[in-house]
Amino acid sequence: MKDSSIEKVKELIKEEFFGESTGHDWYHIERVYKNALKINETEGGNDKIIAYAALLHDIADHKFVEDHESETDKRIRKILGDQDVADHIIDEVLHIAHNISYKGANVENKINTLEGFIVQDADRLDAIGAIGIARAFAYGGSKKRMIYDPEKKPTLHDSFEAYKSDDGHTINHFYEKLLLLKEKMNTETGKKIAEDRHSFMEEFLERFYSEWEAK
Ligand code: ADP
Ligand code: NI
C-alpha cells in the first residue's frame, strides 16, 4: 500500500523501534503490518485503518509503559493528527491499540471491529511458530525469567492483573498463551495460517522435554 501519510508513520515507527530487544522491534511491527494487509486481501476490511493500527499497536505497550492507556491515546492522537488523519479513523485505530493485547486465558477479548480482528490475528501470528518461539525467549530473558522450571506449573489466568503479575518461566508462557492462540484466532485466514505454526510449537516442546530428560 503506497500512501504518503502511511509511509511517514512507517518511517517514524521504524526509527523509534528499530533495535528494540524484547521481540517488539521494528521487524515485528513490519511483519504485523504485512500479515494484516495480507489477511485483509480475503477479509474485506479498511486497509488504511489496518495499516495505521498495525504500525501503532505497540506504541505504548502495557508490558513496558506504566501509563499504557493514556500514553497510547496521547501518542496515537499526536502521530495521526500530524498527518491530518480524520477523527473517525483515529478512533478506530485507538480501539485496536487499546484492546489488541492478550490479557489471560479466560479473559474476554474486547476487540469488536473487523479491522481489529485482523490486526489482532496478525499480531498473534507473530507470537506463534518459529518467530513466536524466538520472541518468547527474548521477552522472557528481558524480564529475567527462567527458561523452564519443571516445579512450576502453568496457570490459566482469569484476570489481566493475575496474568500481568505472573512471574513464571517462559515454557509456562506456551501453555498460558501461545498454544491457546490457534483457537482464539478471529478470522478464517488467520486460523489457517495458525495451524502449521501451532504444530511446530508442539514439536518444539516435545523435543525440549526429551532433551531436558537427556533422552
Ligand atoms: P500482546 O500485545 O498480545 O502481548 P505483543 O505483540 O506485544 O502481543 O507480543 C507479545 C510477545 O511477548 C509474544 O511474542 C510473547 O511470547 C511475549 N511474551 C509476553 N508475555 C510473555 C511471558 N510472560 N513470557 C514470555 N514471553 C512473553
Ligand atoms: Ni505486537
Image: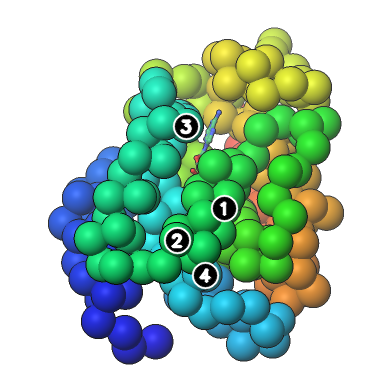
Amino acid tagged 1: Ile
Which is more toward the observer, 89 or 3? 89
Q: Which residue is mark 3?
A: 69
Q: Nearer the viewer, mark 3 or mark 2?
A: 2
Amino acid tagged 2: Asp
Amino acid tagged 3: Glu
Q: Which residue is mark 1?
A: 96
Q: Earlier in the sequence, mark 2 or mark 1?
A: 2
Amino acid tagged 4: Ile
Q: Earlier in the sequence, mark 4 or mark 3?
A: 4
| Residue drawn at the location 68% of the way across and 84% of the way down | 44
Residue 132 in sight here:
no
> Residue 87: which disc?
2
Q: Earlier in the sequence, mark 1 or mark 4?
A: 4
Question: How far is disc 2 from disc 1 in space, using C-alphas?
Answer: 14 Å
Q: Which residue is mark 4?
A: 50
The picture places residue 53, in percent across and down from the top left corner, at 47, 61
Secondary structure at numbered mark 4: helix
Question: How far is disc 1 from disc 3 in space, using C-alphas?
Answer: 12 Å
The correct choice, above or below, for 146 with respect to 138 in the image is above
Secondary structure at numbered mark 2: helix
